[in-house]
Amino acid sequence: MAIYAIGDLHLSVAAKKPMDVFPGWDNHAEKLIENWNRVVGPHDTVVLNGDTSWGMTLQQALPDFRLIHQLPGKKIIIKGNHDYWWASATKMRELFAENSLDSLYILHNNSFTVEGVHICGSRGWMFETGERHDEKLINREAMRIDASIRSVGEQEGERLLFLHYPPLYANQRLEPFLAVMHQYGIRRCYYGHIHGAGHKYAVQGMIQGIEFTMISADYIDFTPVLVHR
């Protein structure tokens, strides 16, 4: 039973919103399905790092959830900045139950343990060039990251952190997020959000004792990345 991860699927079965503003997104849903079926098995787990569906409501996103459900494995979903359908965890779980989408799970202020590895995560935050830094938003997201990691309790095993936004990007560092990672001994962090020309500014590799890996779907050729086996 392996753990994989991929971010930014931007599925749009009902919303019909294209991603052609970026290169390489032609027929991306078909590429995703082919590659997912090639690498992921029925007993594996895939973390979806946000921006899963372009649907504006849960009902509009439902066809995208059904598509994901039909793919192999258990799927753990975190919130992205374009997941406008995101409602309360209760409403989302009710929708999944009502539609027999029993392979889908929500990661929000909680964690999941798979084969002794603890999956933690949240949306995170970042700022575009010229944007004013909002300490309130940063601190709120730091608290959510903390809550997710803390939910593991005293259990043994590595804590993996999945964020939608990159905590490091170009010369930007979100120190409150890094502080939480160091507090809990996080050694690996996976993030998405970055597309197209922004890939060249992504910060990856070992930084301050933490290995950072970008898993935006277009960066990894729409193929889930192996995290743990």
Image (tube, grey):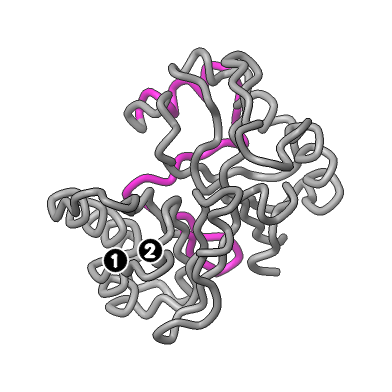
Q: Secondary structure at mark 2?
A: loop
Q: Foreground residue, 19 or 136?
A: 19
Q: Position of residue 156 (x, y in %)?
A: 44, 77
Residue located 52% across and 14% down the image: 60
Name the mark on residue 167. 2
Q: Position of residue 203 (x, y in %)?
A: 49, 70
**Left or right relative to 84: residue 73:** right
The verdict on residue 94 being magenta is yes
The tag earlier along the polypeptide, 2 or 1, is 2
Q: Amino acid at mark 1?
A: Leu
Give the image quarter of residue 88. Answer: top left
Q: Position of residue 57 (x, y in %)?
A: 44, 17
Residue located 32% across and 49% down the image: 109
13 lies above or below 79 = above
**Left or right relative to 19: residue 86:** left
Q: Quadrant of the N terminus?
A: bottom right
Q: Quadrant of the C terminus?
A: bottom right
Residue 29 in view here: yes
Q: Amino acid at mark 2?
A: Pro
From this viewpoint, which residue is outermost toward the front? 130
Residue located 42% across and 64% down the image: 169
Name the mark on residue 174. 1
Q: Position of residue 113 (x, y in %)?
A: 50, 60
Give the CA distance from mark 2 to mark 1.
6 Å
Q: Foreground residue, 36 or 197?
A: 197
2 and 1 marks in contact (CB < 8 Å):
yes
Which region of the structure is painted magenta?
90-119
210 lies above or below 23 = below
Tell how many labels.
2
